Image (cartoon, rainbow, N blue to C red):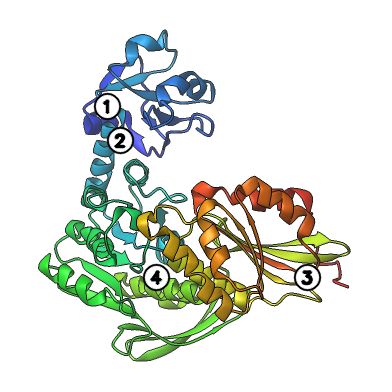
Amino acid sequence: MNWLWTTEDLIAAMAGRPFGTLPEGITGISIDSRSIASGEAFFAIKGDRVDGHDYASMAMANGAALLVVSEARLPAMGRLTVPVIVVEDVLAALGKLGQASRARSRAQIIAVTGSVGKTTTKEMLRRVLSPSGKVHASVASFNNHWGVPLTLARMPLDTYFGVFEVGMNHPDEIRPLVKMIQPHVAVITTIAPAHLGNFKSIREIATAKAEVFEGVVPGGQVVLNRDNDQFNFLERTAETHGIQHIHSFGQHAKAEFRLAEFNGSDQSSTLWITIDGETKEVAIGAPGRHIAENALAALGVVKIVGADMRQAIAALATLQPEKGRGRRHRLAIERSSFTVVDESYNANPASMRAAIAVLASSVPTGTGRRIAVLGDMLEMGDYAEKVHSDLAGPLLAAGIEHVWLAGPEMVALKESLPESVQVVHYEKTEELAEYILNAVAAGDVLMVKSSLGIGFGKIVAVLLDKFPPFADTQRDF
């Protein structure tokens, strides 16, 4: 059997106490009792909202091979019919297992952080490195204090490339995570005003992101955005941490991985990149200049780790945007169709501008409209009113004449737009969703964007529920 972990190694790594007759090994690790697969270990993590110990019986019923539980909760769990490994603290034990996984791995490890583009770049790396060897990468956005150790612990022994996303919204969050990951290559996609409510300036955000340098292994390398205003600061900071191999990407003339030319449409992008003095054409199955910049960083990593560049470029042609990160839906309405661009996963000023640019490049059909459906950007603190009102500039520059808003912070944008723009504003997401169901028309292109906590995914969901997909065999009249 090809175990992810033998039980012996599992117990040793976590300093656990076995209870019952344990299997020889486990095939996987889960922290979700609903989706656990037969043969996997269930780690009963206590989170902010729920305690995994309360779902141990469900995990057992769904086929858990064993449970990892805390010593303190064991007496209250009653009679257990599956074997158990008892530890002092389940999350701490998962962290120890993650460290053991990193210690035994011979993979080339890449860590990705940045204010925007982390998940997209991570998914690009998964795709472009796969032709060159087995890739293990973070699921979804597992980039925090439990997501990183879980992803590490899940890394198979035969992994060739390990790709880890690292997130933060406060100082000192990246530091312990990257010291666990110990990357050979660290990528910072860009520095932008995200989580401004927790920082005094962009420089403070850059300083927090620069914590990623502290975990880079001796002789390791970093990849930085040369077009970003914080490049020089990040470069100097990397040098102070003893990192000698500092690479850059972007349109800047001195960028090592340089964007020579970009040509984008509403559904795809073509770019020409210069690496080692050679210019290559790259087709990407997703729109947006920001996507092209992420691809440039990913291809830079391909070069650094010695993966196959030709196959990596070919892999980008079939790239599709992730759910909530630019995925497009063409839906049927009145013997015709309209388009929804789902950017509902998250938002900050930089990603809002990128999404508006994608909307600007979109072409409605017939009498259709380009409509920006925008919700609050969270964690902006004292900057909230300014960053929301500042979106008026890019909207007007893009020629967007229809702006549908929800959330208390979006009042600032509403008040900043001239009467020439048709603005709708509701306090609650549900109210805006109801309005959209009745107001959307044939030919429209709707770009839906907000911070995750505002719940604009509900708007996309109700649209997908009411309007069926537009079949390729149908015609727009």
**Of residues 133 and 255, which is closer to you in this image?**
255
Q: What residue type is labelled 4?
A: Ala
Of callouts 3 and 1, the N-terminal one: 1
| Residue at 26% from the left image edge and 60% from the top image edge | 200
**Between marks 2 and 4, how big is the CA–CA gap?**
29 Å
User: Residue 381 location in percent, x, y?
Assistant: 37, 54
**Between marks 3 and 2, how big is the CA–CA gap?**
50 Å
Label 3: few (<14), some or many (≥20) within 10 Å? many
**Between marks 3 and 1, how big is the CA–CA gap?**
55 Å
Residue designated by label 2 = 94
Q: Foreground mark, 3 or 2?
A: 3
Circle 4 SS class = helix
**Of residues 343 and 2, which is closer to you in this image?**
343
Residue 325 occupies quadrant = bottom right
**Between marks 2 and 1, how big is the CA–CA gap?**
9 Å
Residue designated by label 1 = 89
Q: Foreground mark, 1 or 4?
A: 1
Residue 8 occupies quadrant = top left
Marks 2 and 4 close (CB-CB < 8 Å): no
Rendered-image quadrant of the N terminus: top left
- Mark carried by residue 298: 4
Q: Foreground mark, 2 or 1?
A: 1
**Of residues 13 and 138, which is closer to you in this image?**
138
Of callouts 2 and 1, the N-terminal one: 1
Image side of residue 130 versus residue 242, left or right: right
Label 2: few (<14), some or many (≥20) within 10 Å? many
Figure check: 3 above or below 316: above
Q: Inspect this view and state whether residue 280 appears.
A: yes
Of callouts 4 and 3, the N-terminal one: 4
Residue 62 occupies quadrant = top right
Circle 2 SS class = helix
Of callouts 2 and 4, the N-terminal one: 2
